[in-house]
Image (cartoon, helix red, strand yellow):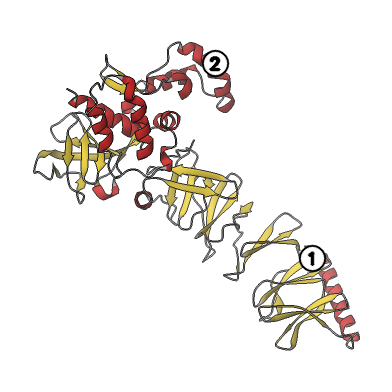
């Protein structure tokens, strides 16, 4: 279904985001895939297909939230997405771990350094190594990629899991930011190739790429 | 094996013992030596010699040495296990075939059930759970998975203790730990209490570089998982 419904990674200028866009003529696609899908799961109906499409239109929010009261930087892998709810801030802080002790704010494209001995804990002040205070943490959660991301990754990134996750993911971010024409889709295949080599999935990749859009000139 | 079957075997044994005593003048031949025990043969029957003493008279159709004190004895296509030190059989003659799998012997009886003997620990696997299948191939794993129907449990190879895990539909052969897949398709690392140890799983996967490959060699299944237990090589 992923192959039929989604095109490969591209930048949508109207929505100002990187995504795996949907193919047109979806009803035609449903009629085409229905028989094969039902041979695997007879209870998968058009409504389920529509729900899948809805989820595919909102990949940024396709994850399982895993609450954790305390987690040390040493136990977070590069590429993992951390979400912190802060006191007096309705917008949770979403960060991708880029390297030991270093994180990328997905909503602003700003990088933070907390140090590799840092622990993210509920009811503690979130402070960077430079002394910049981001707020007081109400809750901490790791975001586990959904099955849509697992399938998208397999189809469009490939066997990334055969490679160890790179120690640093900054090269991907820098590649996009330093691109003289980041809105152009010409370099997209390079982002996907780099994701495969660095051992990261589509959820990590999209969060990094979409963070980069905030720092384009 | 019913009482009547046992009586028949005993009659045959008694008959052969009598025959053996009558042919005292016939030389025994040495067939092989294992674990300091010598398999001897007189006429067409086998026995065991230990420290120059006949500890099992040559009245059996076949003898297989399993450990330094346990042998399998076969008479009229019926197998039992005999403890040399205790000088007695430790099972009845209800088994009709035996298979050597790794460091284990599996004895099958005619009702479909079986007995597993661990030659390293010199103990029997508890089959109170009436499992349909035991993973005996990978004897380097800390736990041996067992299957009843479509669900899997584990048995600790060292202690023989069994652990029933909730809703596990696939198990993996790993050097340490019990890894199982639930009906939702997620893989977890389980403690002996049956509780998932997400912290230990995370530590193992971090040490492995972000992904872990789990294999079930019997079913030829290999799954690569991420730190959340998601199967990635779909």
- Disc 1 packing (10 Å; few <14; some 14–19; many ≥20): many
What's the residue at 87%, 82% (across, down)? B20
Q: Please give the chain letter of the residue carrying mark 2.
A: A
Looking at the image, the residue that sits furthest to the front is A180
Residue bearing mark 2: A32
The number of numbered badges drawn on the structure is 2
Q: Nearer the viewer, residue B176 or B111?
A: B176
Q: Do the residues labelled 1 and 2 touch (CB within 8 Å)?
A: no
What's the residue at 12%, 32% (across, down)? A88
Determine which quarter of the picture holds residue B70: bottom right
Q: Nearer the viewer, residue B132 or A149?
A: A149
Rendered image: mark on residue B78: 1
Left or right position of B22 against B37? right
Determine which quarter of the picture holds residue A187: top left
What's the residue at 36%, 48% (across, down)? B209
Question: In which quadrant is the C terminus of chain A drawn?
Answer: top left
Q: Element type at marker 2? A: helix
Residue A108 in the image: state x and y as whole percent: 18, 29
Left or right position of B153 against A50? right
Q: Which of B196 and B135 is in front in this view?
A: B135
Q: Please give the chain letter of the residue carrying mark 1.
A: B
Question: As displayed, is residue B68 above or below residue B217?
Answer: below
Residue B59 in the image: state x and y as whole percent: 83, 77
Residue B133 in the image: state x and y as whole percent: 63, 52
Measured in 3D between alpha carbons, the distance from the residue under mark 1 to the one under mark 2, in whole angstroms, is: 60 Å
Left or right position of A217 against B141? left
- Disc 2 packing (10 Å; few <14; some 14–19; many ≥20): few
């Amino acid at each position: 279904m992923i192959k039929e419904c989604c095109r490969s990674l591209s930048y949508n200028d109207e929505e100002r985001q990187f995504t795996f866009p949907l193919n047109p003529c979806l009803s035609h696609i449903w009629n085409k895939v229905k028989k094969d899908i039902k041979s695997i799961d007879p209870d998968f109906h058009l409504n389920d297909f529509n729900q899948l499409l809805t989820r595919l239109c909102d990949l940024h929010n396709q994850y399982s939230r895993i609450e954790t009261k305390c987690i040390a930087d040493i136990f977070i892998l590069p590429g993992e997405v951390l979400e912190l709810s802060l006191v007096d801030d309705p917008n949770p802080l979403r960060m991708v771990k880029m390297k030991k002790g270093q994180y990328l704010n997905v909503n602003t494209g700003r990088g933070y350094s907390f140090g590799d001995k840092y622990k993210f804990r509920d009811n503690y002040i979130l402070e960077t190594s430079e002394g910049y205070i981001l707020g007081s943490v109400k809750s901490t959660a790791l975001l586990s990629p959904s099955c849509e991301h697992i399938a998208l990754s397999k189809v469009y990134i490939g066997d990334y899991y055969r490679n160890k996750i790179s120690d640093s993911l900054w090269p991907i971010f820098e590649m996009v930011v330093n691109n003289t024409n980041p809105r152009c889709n010409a370099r997209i295949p390079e982002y996907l190739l780099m994701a495969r080599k660095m051992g990261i999935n589509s959820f990590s990749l999209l969060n990094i790429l979409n963070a980069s859009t905030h720092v384009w000139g | 094996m019913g009482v009547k079957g046992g009586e028949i075997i005993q009659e045959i044994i008694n008959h052969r013992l009598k025959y053996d005593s009558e042919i005292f003048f016939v030389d025994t031949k040495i067939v092989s030596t294992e674990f300091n025990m010598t398999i001897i043969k007189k006429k067409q029957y086998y026995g065991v010699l230990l420290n120059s003493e006949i500890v099992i008279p040559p009245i059996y159709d076949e003898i297989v040495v399993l450990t330094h004190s346990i042998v399998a004895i076969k008479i009229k296509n019926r197998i039992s296990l005999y403890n040399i030190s205790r000088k007695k059989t430790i099972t009845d003659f209800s088994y009709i075939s035996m298979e050597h799998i790794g460091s284990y012997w599996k004895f099958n009886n005619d009702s479909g059930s079986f007995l597993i003997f661990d030659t390293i620990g010199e103990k029997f696997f508890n089959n109170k759970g009436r499992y349909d299948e035991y993973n005996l191939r990978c004897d380097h794993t800390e736990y041996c998975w067992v299957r009843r129907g479509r669900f899997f449990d584990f048995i600790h190879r060292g202690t023989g203790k069994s652990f029933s895990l909730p809703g596990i539909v696939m198990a993996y052969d790993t050097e340490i730990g019990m890894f199982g897949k639930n009906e939702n398709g997620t893989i977890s690392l389980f403690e002996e209490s049956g509780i998932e140890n997400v912290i230990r799983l995370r530590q193992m996967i971090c040490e492995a570089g972000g992904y872990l490959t789990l294999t079930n060699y019997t079913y030829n299944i290999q799954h690569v998982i991420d730190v959340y237990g998601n199967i990635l090589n779909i």
